[in-house]
Amino acid sequence: MKAVTFDSSLSKYIYTFLAGKVSKKLYCGGLSCVKMENINEPELPGEDWVKVKTIYGGICGSDTNLVFLHDTPTLSPFVSEKFVIGHENVGNIVEKGKNVKDFNIGDRIVADILLPCETFGSKKCKNCSEGNTNLCENFSKGKPLTGMMLGTCNQTGGSWGEYYVAHKSQLFKVPDNLSSEQAVLVDPLASAIHPALKSLPEDSDKILIIGMGIIGLMMVAFLRYAGCKANITVIARYDFQGQLAKKYGADQVIYSNNDNIEQKMADLTGACIHKPMIGEKYLMGGYDKIFDCVGSQRSIKDCLRFVKSGGNVVLTGLAANINIDWTLVWFKEINLQGIYCYGSDNFKGANVRTYKIALDMLSSGKIDTAPLVTHVFTLSDYKKAIDTASSKGRHKSIKVLLKSI
């Protein structure tokens, strides 16, 4: 089958790191870590598994970080040395093991991306037994699956390939009223729902969401869908992002190139601005809760500058290799909350799989997802797809898909 793979062997990594400095195009193909190739289709690891023919694989910000080597090796123990990229997925079941009773050949499904205890037949750890599969204590721990999630595991494949395999516990049927273009948005929507519910704003709160990529936009939409009446300010980089944020329920949009952003924030929150003798201005007072959907040095600094004393900062975007002055965390007694993927969340009084919450929201018809999928490419055009996904301003891209069928 055709697939876009990542090979982290040392020789590939060194070549890609050096060649990418010469030209962005050299991060893919040839001797680089990322290339398209013909490989064997993944086989069912056991009778509790299904094989899926990919319809769409989405391109996530974590995927582009991988391609351009922006990640650190910190999580390398939980990743195969070589694997098919892609975790955002939707496809049709084409083969199943004899223990799979609730799904049939031909069913259109999305698969929860994580590979926790249940997927390799282990007794559930404490976190998995409580529904927090994103915090599984046994990822890649002496098990046959050499990866913690779809799209990093050699045995499962990924959605940037023509086929992948998934455990029955990962599967969710796609409702008939959802298109495949909508269904592939379940993963980024779940990635917005989980942090929102972990630090759900009160109606009286003033909140700030930094970053209006797909997750930031969906966080605005989910909060309104969930009935949240908090005042929502967002920071967007581009006008098309700001317009969509307003469409989905943001009260104010501030653009990241605003020369007087501190004053704007102070005006909106009633905070006071302070200027140290060296360094950037910051607020005393400010936002009750800030959700960082970027994960950059700039965005984290802004979280600490704009949150109120005793406020919450929720780190949704993956931050690596950053240099931060943490003085304000101490001085303001800021509560920092890290977020990794999703598992189950408390919603409307029940503990529910986050994917189920996302599918229910998408199938409710209460959110117009049409503006979110902006580009679709074939697998063979993966280089153009990556360029489009990583150049949002130039292409006005939000969610870019790779099409297999």
Image (cartoon, rainbow, N blue to C red):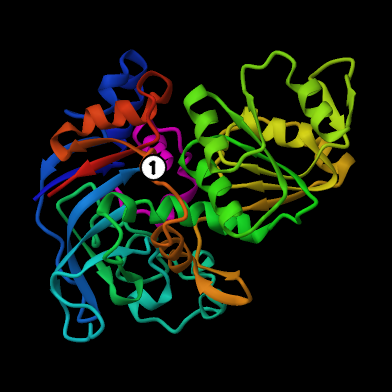
**Is residue 161 found left or right of 134 in the rendered image?**
left
Q: What residue lies at 16% left-to-right and 40% top-to-bottom?
A: 379
Q: Position of residue 162 (x, y in %)?
A: 14, 52
Q: Is residue 332 above or below residue 349?
A: above
What is the tally of numbered marks visible in this picture? Answer: 1
The residue nearer to you, when weighing 384 against 120, is 384
Q: What residue lies at 39% left-to-right and 78% top-to-bottom?
A: 118
The quadrant holding residue 364 is bottom left
Q: Is residue 50 above or below residue 283?
A: below
Q: Is residue 145 above or below residue 125?
A: above
User: In terms of secondary structure, where does tag 1 sit?
Assistant: loop
Q: Is residue 241 visible?
A: yes
Q: Is residue 88 visible?
A: no
The residue nearer to you, when weighing 228 against 387, is 228
Disc 1 target residue: 60
The residue nearer to you, when weighing 160 against 11, is 160
Q: Position of residue 165 (x, y in %)?
A: 22, 65
Q: What residue lies at 19% left-to-right and 55% top-to-bottom?
A: 54
Q: Which residues are magenta?
A: 61-86
Q: Residue type at mark 1?
A: Cys
Verify whether residue 79 appears in magenta: yes
